[in-house]
Amino acid sequence: MAAEYQLYCFDKSGNAYKVALMLNVSGADWRPRFVDFMHGETKSEAFRKLNPMGEVPLLQHDGLMLSQSGVILDYLAEKTGGFGAENDAQRREILRWILFDNHKLTSYIATLRFIRAFTERGENEVTQFFEARAKAALKVLNSHLQNSSFAIGDRVTIADFSMCGYLYFQDEIGIDFAEYPHIIRWLADIQDLEGWAHPYDLMPGESIKA
Ligand SMILES: N[C@@H](CCC(=O)N[C@@H](CS)C(=O)NCC(=O)O)C(=O)O
């Protein structure tokens, strides 16, 4: 029987990981569908028919095809009843951190990591620029986590899943996380959740397809 949720993803995608992690720690019945990003599948006509934005994650559920990790996380919080807001103030806080993540944290870190880990471009003005922007965002998050166990208090929410998306790829980002001790503590706390797995173990890649 087909799994309830089908996630279009690949193992190098921290954006897809945000959703894969949510599905896994929620104990959802889900199955990954490998998207061969490294060989251009997201640019293909067939994929653009599924998602005109040409991106993973893409979640198929109940006749819907959802894109944008923040939207999918919000949808899953509603469907599973877990890791979402318990009141309006929390809903706004979750949205605030997800927007911060999409604009300032993931965007710079993901691009920096991509250039460093998957291209031969080497260090240049672009990597310098992205590194400075990434570090500024990490500093904001680190300061916040000094006084808060998780993004919005003592409870893990989808805002945490969004922001941690790329941060388990530390070796590939090329930034020393020792400067961000509260982020290290927070990542370890998320890692303690039942169902946590590293992106490379949770989603299919070139060698393991699903
Ligand atoms: N804001 C989007 C970002 C998604 C994104 O950048 N996905 C990348 C993989 S990590 C992608 O599929 N890129 C395809 C391409 O650029 O062709 C989200 O949160 O879902």
Image (cartoon, rainbow, N blue to C red):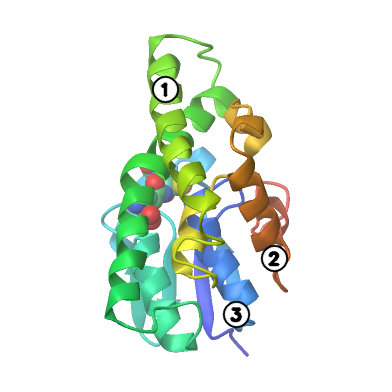
Residue 192 in picture, x, y percent from top left: 73, 65
Amino acid type at image mark 1: Ala
In the rendered image, which quarter is residue 70 located in?
Answer: bottom left
Q: Which residue is under mark 3?
A: 26
Of residues 127 and 209, which is closer to you in this image? 127
Q: Indicate if the residue with disc 1 has its beta carbon within 8 Å of ligand 1.
A: no
Nearest-to-viewer mark from 3 and 1:
1
Q: Which residue is under mark 1?
A: 132
Extreme top residue here?
124
Of residues 57 and 166, which is closer to you in this image? 166
User: Which of the image's four quarters has the C terminus?
Assistant: bottom right
Of residues 120 and 82, which is closer to you in this image? 82
Residue 113 in picture, x, y percent from top left: 53, 31
Mark 2: give few (<14), some (14-19) or many (20+) Cα within 10 Å: some
Which is more N-terminal, label 1 or label 2? Answer: 1
Which is more N-terminal, label 3 or label 2? Answer: 3
Tell me if residue 24 comes above or below residue 107 in the rendering. Answer: below
